[in-house]
Image (cartoon, coloured by chain):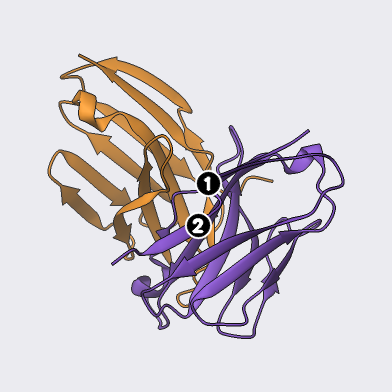
Chain colours: A purple, B orange
Amino acid sequence: NAGVTQTPKFRVLKTGQSMTLLCAQDMNHEYMYWYRQDPGMGLRLIHYSVGEGTTAKGEVPDGYNVSRLKKQNFLLGLESAAPSQTSVYFCASSPLGGGAGANVLTFGAGSRLTVL
Amino acid sequence: TQLLEQSPQFLSIQEGENLTVYCNSSSVFSSLQWYRQEPGEGPVLLVTVVTGGEVKKLKRLTFQFGDARKDSSLHITAAQPGDTGLYLCAGARSSNTGKLIFGQGTTLQVKP
């Protein structure tokens, strides 16, 4: 059981380049999320999805786009990378349902992105 | 605006010492979680607290949710080098969206 898998683990981009981060989960979770982690700022939610075909903006969505064409995959795209998007990106998923269980996130190992 | 304030942000202690990490907010949360993260890995859930005043213990770790569900604390007794890591608190504003608000994190170093 792999849980949440992110690819690639590392990437270096030049300003203006585009790229896509892929997240795959094998737990049949309904909800998926993309967070970014920066020193001293904890994790901030970029975009999230409450089911296949749905996406919604989080706390810091500008400069990013997402797609959830299949339930198990959640893609994060950067159309024109900027140095401010240098960060570690984490994908997470959680099951459907009310109560505390719905908020239990399983995270991937992270993708470190550097924009020069 | 950081809705969840963690303190301290950095803590370096000797093996065997006790410590407490605080997570404070002016907002009410339906539940609050504590995660631990090691370098190069994603956060891993330690505990979820749901009821105001709730106390949960996980071996040497004691977690408490404030009566008003606005704050939480993590107490570690007799810290060990294996406790070294980044500790994150995260609050949920509703019970079923999965959207969490994270604190800045507390980096703990336990020296042997």
Name the spot of residue B6 as percent of width and height, x first: 48, 38
Q: Is residue B48 visible?
A: yes
Figure label count = 2
Q: Residue at x 59, y 55 (%)?
A: A35
Quadrant of the image occupied by residue A73:
bottom right
Name the spot of residue B110 as percent of width and height, x first: 27, 20
Residue B24: mark in rendering:
none
Query: In the image, is A106 to the left or to the right of A16?
Result: left
- Nearest the viewer among B71 and B39 is B39
Outermost residue to the left: B59
Locate the N terminus of chain A and report the quarter of the image it occupies. bottom left
State whether residue A30 is above or below residue A85.
below
State whether residue A56 is above or below residue A115.
below
How would you rate the neighbour count of disc 1 (Cα within 10 Å): few for under 14, some for 14-19, many for 20 or more? some
Q: Amino acid at mark 1?
A: Lys
Q: Chain of mark 1?
A: A
State the CA–CA distance, disc 2 to disc 1. 7 Å
Q: Are marks 2 and 1 in contact (CB under 8 Å)?
A: yes
SS of the residue at dot 1? loop
User: Label 1: which residue?
Assistant: A9
State whether residue A76 is above or below residue B80.
below
Both marks 2 and 1 on one chain: yes
Name the spot of residue A75 as percent of width and height, x first: 63, 67
SS of the residue at dot 2? strand
Q: Chain of mark 2?
A: A
Q: Is residue B29 visible?
A: no
User: Label 2: which residue?
Assistant: A6
State whether residue B88 is above or below residue A27.
above
Q: Residue at x 85, y 52 (%)?
A: A80
Query: In the image, is A112 to the left or to the right of A115?
Result: left
